[in-house]
Every structure is written in C-alpha cells, then in structure tokens.
Image: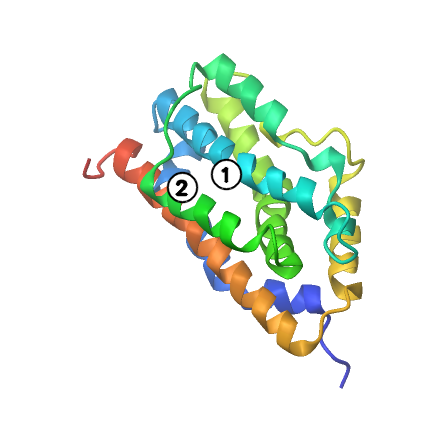
Amino acid sequence: MAEELFSAAVRRSTEGRHRDAEQAVFLGQLVTGALPLAGYAAMVAQHHHIYSVLEEAAAVMRDDPVAGPFVHDGLTRLPALEADLRELDGAGLPPSPATQRYTQRLRDVCFTWPGGFVAHHYTRYLGDLSGGQYIAAAVRRHYTTSATSFYAFDGIGSPAAFKARYRSALDAAPWDQEERRRIVDEVLVAYQLNIDVLTDLGREHAAGQAA
C-alpha cells in the first residue's frame, strides 16, 4: 500500500475543523447578506491584525531552506487589506480577544519554527484561495462595496495550479514523520484560532447572537 502524501494527510486530518469553520454563524450570515456592512469591515480588520504578523514572519522565513519556498510575493495581503479597510472606513478597529490569542500564537511559533510557520501559512493562504473566493463573490453580491481586493491574487497565476504546486512542496519538504505530526497538530491549532476569531465576530455582529 502506497504511503499517504503529506498534503493529503493534512487535508484528511483537518476535515472536521474545516467544516466547523465553514459552519460558523458569522460566515453563514455574511455570505447571505444578513450582516450589516460593519460586520464585514470588522472581519477585514481582524485579518489585517493577523496578516501583519504572518507576513512579518514570512520576511524572516524567506531565506530559510525549508520554509522559504512557501513564501511568494504574490500572496502578500497587507496592501490589499489596507485598501479594503480604507474603503470600509475600518482602519483602527482593535483586535478581538481571539485575534490577540491568534497573533500571539503566530509570534510564538512562526518566527523560529519553519514547520510551524508553514502550518499557519498553509491554513490562511490556501483557505483564502479556496473558500475565500466564495466569500468574496458573496460580499460583492450582497453589499454595496468593492472592498474585496484581499481575495484577489493577481500575482500567482492560476489559483488551482498554484495550490497544486503548494501541495507538491508540502509533499517534498524534508520533514520526518514526527515533524509531520507536529505540523498537522499546528494546522489544527490554526484552524481553531480562526474559528475562535469568527466566534468573536459572531458575538459582536451576527444577528440573534448575544452581545
């Protein structure tokens, strides 16, 4: 029996958390247009706090022999997030408690552990290239805003081809089985941190949720 590719193992191991994220009340109301635009602006602001740290870590990891191949200038999100926040008048919105925990975790693992950096990099960017595209289309459909440049990856070519190359890089990285288990565990942590951010947003903005 052929050994399971690492990229396939990561996807299989995180299917449950992926479904949990997709089923978050906040996201469900966002993609159906049930939230005020301020709710979307708050999500963009939380993304800005998260990517500020993740892309700071990318600058540090760029020259690492293992993590460096995953760093791609076409993925950089901060300029797009800043443009979206200007349009949404959302600059200066503070990080939620969940976002503060998330950014602290990024600082704890992404600047010194290549595998941890890749775990968080994979979780965010491949999510943006997948389900994020559905979110962007829904926002454009339901809200009077074009502030979705965060989801436009113009510098990577075909998103499908890029994701395939990314997964091939995961499979080719020189991690032993113990390190692969550690990385999968960190991807699960990353998913939970993202779910926690959505939960905080839901408490504040989702209709019918307690403030």
Q: Nearer the viewer, residue 127 or 45?
A: 45
- Amino acid type for the residue under numbered disc 1: Ile
Q: Can residue 23 be seen in this view?
A: no
Q: Is residue 186 left or right of residue 58?
A: left
How packed is label 1: few (under 14 Cα within 10 Å), some, or many (20 or more)? many
* Residue beneath the point at 80% across and 64% down: 172
Question: Which mark identifies residue 205?
Answer: none
Hey, which residue is sitting farthest bottom in the picture?
A: 1
Q: Nearer the viewer, residue 76 or 199?
A: 76
Alpha-carbon span between mark 1 and mark 2: 7 Å
Q: Is residue 24 left or right of residue 189?
A: left
For the residues labelled 1 and 2, say whether their Cβ atoms are less than 8 Å apart. Answer: yes
Colour scheme employed for the rendering of this structure = rainbow
Quadrant location of residue 97? Answer: top left
In this rendering, is residue 28 above or below 39?
below
Q: Is residue 159 left or right of residue 201?
A: right
First along the sequence among labels 1 and 2:
1
The residue labelled by disc 2 is 99
How packed is label 2: few (under 14 Cα within 10 Å), some, or many (20 or more)? many
Quadrant location of residue 6? Answer: bottom right
Question: Which mark identifies residue 50?
Answer: 1
In this rendering, is residue 55 above or below 33?
below
In this rendering, is residue 201 above or below 178?
above
Label 1: state its secondary structure. Answer: helix
Label 2: state its secondary structure. Answer: helix
- Amino acid type for the residue under numbered disc 2: Thr
Q: Give the x, y percent position of residue 134.
A: 56, 37
In this rendering, is residue 208 above or below 164?
above
- The C terminus appears in which quarter of the rendering? top left
Q: Give the x, y percent position of residue 191.
A: 48, 54
